[in-house]
Amino acid sequence: MATILLLLLGLLVGLPLLRAHGVTGSAAPTPPPLPVLPVPSYAQLQWQLSEMALFLHFGPNTFTDSEWGSGRADPAVFAPSALDAGQWARAAAAGGFGRVVLTAKHHDGFCLWPSALTNYSVAASPWKGGAGDVVGELAAAARAEGIGLGLYLSPWDRHEPVYGDTVAYNEHYLGQMMELLTRYGDVEEVWLDGAKGEGKDMDYMFDAWFALIHQLQQRVVIFSDAGPDTRWVGDEAGVAGYTCWSPFNKSTVTIGHIIPEYSRCGDPFGQDWVPAECDVSIRPGWFWHASEKPKNATTLLDIYYKSVGRNCLLILNVPPNSSGLISTEDMQVLQEFTEIRQTIFSQNFAANATVTASTVRGGLGNQQFAPSNVLQESIYSYWAPEEGQSSWEMLFDLGQSASFNVIQLQEPIQMGQRVIKFRVEILVDELWQTIVEGTTIGYKRLFQFPVVEGQFLKLSIDSARADPLISFFGVFMDSFSVTYSLENHEKPSVVNSSEVIMLRTDHSFGNKSIATM
């Protein structure tokens, strides 16, 4: 009955509601639309699909209560009594983190693997009698848990005597990079920055570094301020721009010299695919300190919405303690963070919706690009409209009225990032009223708003770089976030006016059509 009513609604207002969920038909095969460049590489796609990474800052700083090591600490201070890389990897896998990234060498120059190019490493420590290898243990643990391995090799080395001699140190750095990328199997991310020592006339040969990394590891992405594969979002709060494009011009910024707003938001005219990575620590510092406490789970949830939910990857630092374990209190927060995400996103009120659209590529019978594809949480199936349209709409009948305060949208980013501006409306008392207005979608977009209740929703795409493609539409209830909780939905909410426009009445054809019905 709901499908018939929606079809009647479309006929009454002149909107051809084509390809309802479950409707079958026959049509000639239709090829997919052309991708809109730039598009991600295979490695960049795998990076994006992993959604979150667990960052592990660990080394002599952990034992000296420091953030910035001097490079002069005695290797004997590195003496974890119960180091368990398996615990780190299990925590990552259980928490939904697709990879772990370890500080194999931080600014102090101490190596967490037995490097042949320095005497300042775990081989000079009492841990395991000098026979230990943290990188090796984590690599094995990550493989056992089915997650990716990433490594941070600091360009700045406060211990190495040749630091400051450009040629000698670049050779030293590349030698250590070669050790890391040839000893431990697949490395899926290399993380580096442009940090430099004070008073040192030092040039980093980034192009040579990047060439070697890509030569040695086929599945790797390289993170830095400016790419080449993933970019820094520009802050250490884990927050992306409200508008966030993966397209980017690498020539606009350099490592160590970024334009913060450009890094946060990306560039719809960018020639390169360089998505943003959002780094933040669970604690005030990046290394473990006994005096510090972790953020709570709802704070992490807010960061998740503003990173993963804005087309980025969240890299959350959870530093092991001086025993070599992730602390119990941090583990508790990670578990709670996981449980509340699972609670929120385990019930999609649109999972069994009836979906119709203004047009469908290939016509009514073409299931390949049917509106119902957006009910499958996969970027590899999607709705596509006919070519040559100037605006696009999808209607959703949830089947029954539901209360919700989160909407999830996704684009098939392997086809390029397309949507520039859109809005979602709900039918309330025979009026279409706007819940959210948004700009970019990308791999994943999550919108929060005060609780609304209804059965019929409309997604309108007002502008796009090319024919818009939508791979997922989900409707959820978050009862954990304070601003948008059930308990607070009666109260006025202070929100970013550019992000949420609550219940603005639309006096367009939608109202007339319902009145006619």
Image (cartoon, helix red, strand yellow):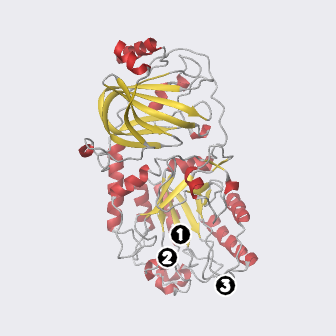
Q: Nearer the viewer, residue 118 or 400?
A: 400
Label at residue 51 = none
Label at residue 103 = 1
Which quadrant of the figure has residue 85?
bottom left
**SS type, badge 2:** loop
Q: Earlier in the sequence, mark 3 or mark 1?
A: 1
Label at residue 161 = 3
Residue at 57% of width from left, 46% of height from top? 245
What is the x, y in percent for residue 150? 55, 61
Q: Mark 2 sits on what residue?
A: 59
Q: CA distance from mark 2 to mark 1?
A: 8 Å
**SS type, badge 1:** strand
What is the x, y in percent for residue 23? 46, 17
Q: Earlier in the sequence, mark 3 or mark 2?
A: 2
Q: Amino acid at mark 1?
A: Thr
Q: Are marks 2 and 1 in contact (CB under 8 Å)?
A: yes
What is the x, y in percent for residue 41? 64, 47
Left or right side of 23 for 482: left
Q: Nearer the viewer, residue 264 or 100?
A: 264
Rendered position, 179 above or below 200: above
Residue at 70% of width from left, 55% of height from top? 251
Q: Nearer the viewer, residue 393 or 277?
A: 393
Q: Are marks 3 and 1 in contact (CB under 8 Å)?
A: no
Q: Amino acid at mark 3?
A: Pro
Residue reaching furthest right? 167
Q: Is residue 111 visible?
A: yes
Which quadrant of the figure has residue 433?
top left
Q: CA distance from mark 3 to mark 1?
A: 21 Å
